Amino acid sequence: MRITVLGKSPSWQDVGGACSGYLVQDGATTVLVDCGNGVFGKLREHADYLDVDAVVISHMHADHTLDLVPYAYALTYSPRQQPLPVGGHAGREVPARPALHVPPGAGETLRQICSAWNCPGLVENAFNLHEYEPGGAVAIGGLVFRFGLVPHYIPTYAIRITAGGGTGPSVTYGADCSPNDEIVAFAQGTDLLILEATLARPERSGIRGHLTGLEAGDHARRAGVGRLVVTHIPDEIDQQLAREDAERAFGGPTDLAAEGAVFEL
């Protein structure tokens, strides 16, 4: 299993970067996990978007979903998707329609978003949309995706991906979350944990929604994971310091989720 970081920015993009998006490949299977702003262009640098088997979404914040819109437009209007020859392309009798696995209720959210410009069915017509069950599992090729609820500002699901039909190595993506025990239990023993370390220091007031580097490392230590990758860190703070904080709290190998970075299991 090969994981490529397409975007790691928080809710605003780094200079030249993209928000959350991770390309997961295993043999002939290609899956995009999250599709935040800027991710579709980054995807095209690494894979043909028509060859993606599925897109899996952790939660419905814009920095994890916004590029579903340009992706849907490409699937709808690309010359390669048309039934007749267009622009030198031979035409395609059956257009590509990747699966789109989203949290409960997300289908209606996407319809409301696209209704703003009178195109409510854009995303669900371009993709084969499914709403996954909390605590459930979805098989895509030889990969098994499991979903665990974690605390954030809106319903959010960590995603554990296991190769070998569910018996091989695993990577857990924590999505966005506040300090919690749920991700520790859900990620227990995973080979690779991708966990946000958005904050240089905890929020001063209000509901917690994100982790610091130290907190990310502590969660990884308690989960007994093999390796930690910290992500969702803005480029305005010292990212190496965030990595060092996480590594110190974790006590194990820790990497930064730099765009274009590749992790293999």
Image (cartoon, rainbow, N blue to C red):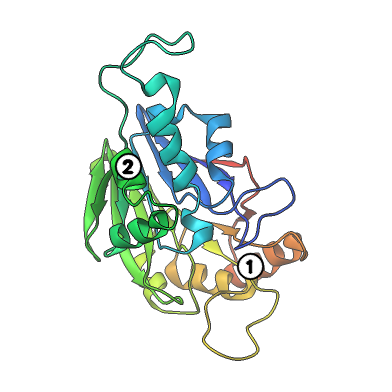
On screen, residue 74 above or below 15: above
Q: Tell me the SS state at disc 1.
A: helix
Q: Left or right of 157: which side holds 93?
A: left
Q: Which mark is residue 163?
A: 2
On screen, residue 51 above or below 85: below
Residue, disc 1: 246
Query: Closer to the camera, 243 or 232?
Result: 232
Q: CA distance from mark 2 to mark 1?
A: 26 Å
Assess disc 2: are there few (<14), some (14-19) or many (≥20) residues with their C-alpha within 10 Å of its C-alpha.
Answer: many
Name the quarter where the N terminus is drawn: top left
**Residue 213's x, y, as percent?**
64, 70
Assess disc 1: are there few (<14), some (14-19) or many (≥20) residues with their C-alpha within 10 Å of its C-alpha.
Answer: many
Q: What residue do we see at 75% from left, 50% from top?
A: 15
Q: What residue do we see at 53% from left, 40% from top?
A: 40
Task: Give the residue type at disc 2.
Answer: Ala
Q: What residue do we see at 70% from left, 74% from top?
A: 200
Query: Closer to the camera, 100 or 259?
Result: 100
Outermost residue toward the bottom in this view: 205
**Residue 138's x, y, as percent?**
23, 49
CB atoms at circles 2 and 1 under 8 Å apart?
no
On screen, residue 31 above or below 34: above
Name the quarter where the C terminus is drawn: top left
Q: What residue do we see at 50% from left, 53% from top?
A: 66
Residue 24 seen from this side: no
